[in-house]
Image (spheres, rainbow, N blue to C red):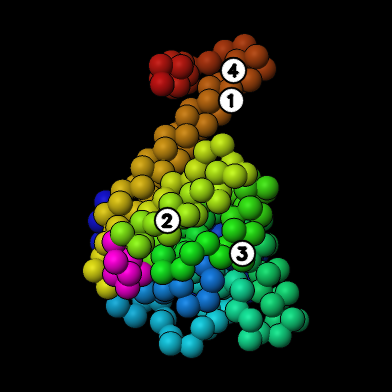
Amino acid sequence: MEIKNAKYEISNAKVEQCPATDVPEYAFIGRSNVGKSSLINMLTRRKGLAKTSQKPGKTLLINHFKINDGAFYIVDLPGYGYAQRGKAQREEFRGIIEQYILGRQQMTLLFVLIDIRHKPQKIDLEFLSWLGENQVPFAIVFTKADKLGPNAGLAHVEDYKKELLNYWEELPPIFITSSEKSTGRDDLLNYIEEINRKVHLEKNAEENVGNAEAIVEKVSIDGDVDAEEISLQDNAEEK
């Protein structure tokens, strides 16, 4: 898949103020300074689409970016674990994050970003565990692969796998990326395209079932149905 266009749409702190659409949303989250904005810019090939900063903790709201004329959204969520925030502000951001992840029906998948330069961190493992407990669909994206030698990077990935397998029977999808070198871009976009295709097929199937049920109900009430409705019912059953 290729991203043909990407446009910033809205930022807000409340789930109910998110765009009123029924298209998939792919949210990105991670610890502060994990390279989230840079990764989004790399995926969309739009430098400056998501604002980057040398100062951690600058993403304060839920940011929506419309992709390919609204085929789906990329969502930039506030980072977690920024120690310099006060307790009250940390709780506020935690509420924003949890409301979106658990309450946003359109959120199709959460990409959890982890800095590949570090060995497993307690805060990341706790967050991944929370996602598992709440049955949130997610994938792990290791960032900044260009900042570390390939052997050391893979060793850290394996360390995370071992930690997670202590609690889970199977691992989520895992990607290794570099925003500087565009490493992993095709893998991530192809994965999103695959999920989009499944979502589209499921939506079509639900619509066909709904049409067929409506026809059956009409027949039972009126005792009659025209040729166009019969054709629609037959098509739904074939699919």
Dot 2 corresponds to which residue? 157
Q: Which secondary structure, mark 2?
A: helix
Mark 1, other Cα within 10 Å: few <14 / some 14–19 / many ≥20: some
N-terminal of the pair, mark 3 or mark 4, is: 3
N-terminal of the pair, mark 3 or mark 1, is: 3
Residue 49, image x, y percentages:
36, 76
Q: Is residue 2 left or right of residue 86?
A: left
N-terminal of the pair, mark 1 or mark 2, is: 2
Mark 2, other Cα within 10 Å: few <14 / some 14–19 / many ≥20: many
What stretch of residues is rendered in magenta?
Answer: 144-150
Dot 4 corresponds to which residue? 216
Residue type (three-letter) at the residue carrying disc 1: Ala
Q: Which mark is residue 122?
A: 3
Query: Quick check: marks 1 and 2 in contact, CB under 8 Å?
Result: no
Residue 228, image x, y percentages:
43, 21
Is residue 90 or residue 168 the one in the foreground? 168
Dot 1 corresponds to which residue? 214
In what quadrant of the picture does the C terminus appear?
Answer: top left
